[in-house]
Image: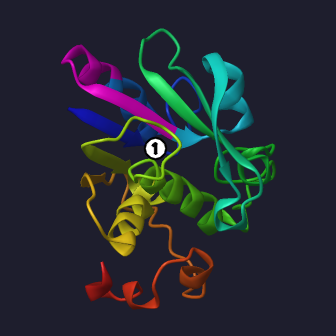
Amino acid sequence: MRVLFVSSEVYPLIKTGGLADVSGALPPALAELDVDVRILMPGYPQAMARLEAPRRIATLGSPLGAGETHLVEGFLPGTAVLVWLIDSPAQYGRGGGPYQDEWGNEWFDNGLRFGLLGWVAAALCRDWSPLDWRPDVVHANDWQSGLAAAYLRAWGGPRPGTALTIHNIAYQGAFPGDLVARLDLPGDMYQPEGL
């Protein structure tokens, strides 16, 4: 089985809470069970600096108007688990933390930043993916990667199974409705029946 594990934080690459602990422990445990697991996460400066044996493997263009975006492959430190970092400096190459600036303010464009994470996860499942590897299951974690399943549904056609694990329901990623169009999602998805 091939699993794409999508998370906004993975220990020891970057951590703000329990999500990073689970995301750093579950993929290696799955790999020990002979699951072909790959981690996809944003290429924050901290993660880029800690990734083992990094190398650029693909160019994705400028999805969602994010600017030049690449995939960087390396290993989760101390493991043989492959990690794909989304190298999009305009979205992730910032000071501060994954969700907030140096002064504790939420990044004004978090909806787009993490929309990009979902978009890339879904793109890696399509025939037009720049990689040869395709997952059987996409495991999204918390709201930051939840749009992966929405993109897969919106684009139609064959798709992998999807799972969404909610680690902390207090953080829901609520944004204004006009973001739906900016994320290139169909407007009819912006209702309870839409998903």
Q: Is residue 55 or residue 163 the one in the foreground?
A: 55
User: What span is in magenta?
Assistant: 28-40
Name the foreground residue: 44 vs 95: 44
Question: With respect to residue 78, does 98 lie above or below?
Answer: below
Query: Which quadrant of the structure image shows residue 162?
Result: bottom left
Q: Quadrant of the N terminus?
A: top left
Left/right of residue 21 with respect to residue 85 in the rendered view: left
Question: Which residue was labeled with disc 1?
Answer: 7
Kind of residue sitting beneath label 1: Ser
**Residue 95 in the figure: left or right of residue 180:** right
| Residue 6 or residue 94, whichever sits in front | 6
**Residue neighbourhood size for the residue with mark 1, other residues' Cα within 10 Å, grouped as few (<14), some (14–19), many (≥20):** many
Q: Is residue 96 above or below residue 163?
A: above
The quarter of the picture where residue 135 lies is: top left
Residue located at (23% from left, 25% from top): 35
Residue 99 pos. (x, y %): 64, 53
Q: Quadrant of the C terminus?
A: bottom left
Name the residue rendered at 57%, 74% in the picture: 183
> Which percent across, then down, holds residue 149?
35, 62
Secondary structure beneath dot 1 equals loop
Total marks placed = 1
Instruction: Give left or right: position of 125 versus 160.
Output: right
Looking at the image, which residue sits at the far top?
Answer: 78
